[in-house]
Amino acid sequence: MRGMEILFLGTGTSHGVPVISCQCSTCQSTDPKNKRLRTSVLITINGKNILIDTSIDFRQQCLAYNINRIDAILFTHHHVDHIFGLDEIRVFNKIQNQRIPCFAGPTTIKMLRHTFSYIFDYPEIPGGIPMLDLINVDKPFELFGSVIVPIEIMHGRLPIYAYRIGDFIYATDCSGIPEKSLALFQNAEILVLDCLRRRPHPTHYNLEQALDVVDKLHPAQTYFTHISHDLEHQEISQSLSENVQLAFDGLRIKL
Ligand SMILES: [Zn+2]
Ligand SMILES: [Zn+2]
Ligand SMILES: [Zn+2]
């Protein structure tokens, strides 16, 4: 997919890095690459801004990167770190004078309606709430001239979505790729993959597992995301090969 740009708005796990009150060397580091807001990316394609997830830090991310337009949102799943910035969409409704389409799987839509009942149960209250259209997707769909492919992945026991756009794949909060989804992970130019920490975790790949996945899928380039304070940027980056790197907040990639 030519002419596509990816901006990493956040690459941190649900606590963010630094973790509140933590004295570890990553949290105390002055390297900006060890400052990780909650995980999200902005994809610009055909002049449109597609946001993946509205992280808790969404407002701060918009201010940091001068984001002045959101044309659509893709949700991976309903966990708090990925959705709690949703209320900030009000600003974009106002700027653009339009509702914003949000694409997600059925469970995520159900949970968004539940968690944000003030948005969806009282739509007659004008102003004050985001104007959103929730659109249930379970197969590839076209958006602004590109095909978006939702891919089922496992986040512990919860099936959630990775998304593929052309040869770019975004798979955060992943601890397993079902057999039926493997074909959709083939021949990626860029794979963004969950990599939480060194120790195993029930709902996220650790470093060893994430590297095994890279070995199996051999994408041209991989960036790890959803990173905890266990992984110090410089130290881990030096131990990885050139085509596998830790993502960091503010990283921009062009395809
Ligand atoms: Zn998460
Ligand atoms: Zn720490
Ligand atoms: Zn999650």
Image: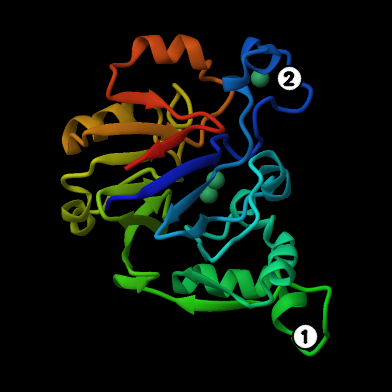
The residue pinned by badge 2 equals 22
Q: Which residue is drawn at 82% across and 84% down?
A: 126
Position of residue 113 measured from the top left corner of the image (x, y, whole percent):
64, 75
The part of the image, by quadrant, that contains residue 142 is bottom left
Q: Is residue 159 above or below residue 197?
A: below
Position of residue 246 measured from the top left corner of the image (x, y, whole percent):
43, 25
The part of the image, by quadrant, that contains residue 16 is top right
Position of residue 202 measured from the top left corner of the image (x, y, whole percent):
45, 40
Q: Nearer the viewer, mark 1 or mark 2?
A: 1
Circle number at residue 122 = 1
In the foreground, 43 or 96: 96
Q: Is residue 211 above or below residue 186?
A: above
Name the quadrant of the C terminus. top left
Residue type, label 2:
Cys
Q: Residue at x 37, y 52 (%)?
A: 154
- Can you tell me whether the CB of the residue at mark 2 lies under 8 Å from the nearest atom of ligand 2? yes
- Mark 1, secondary structure of its residue: loop
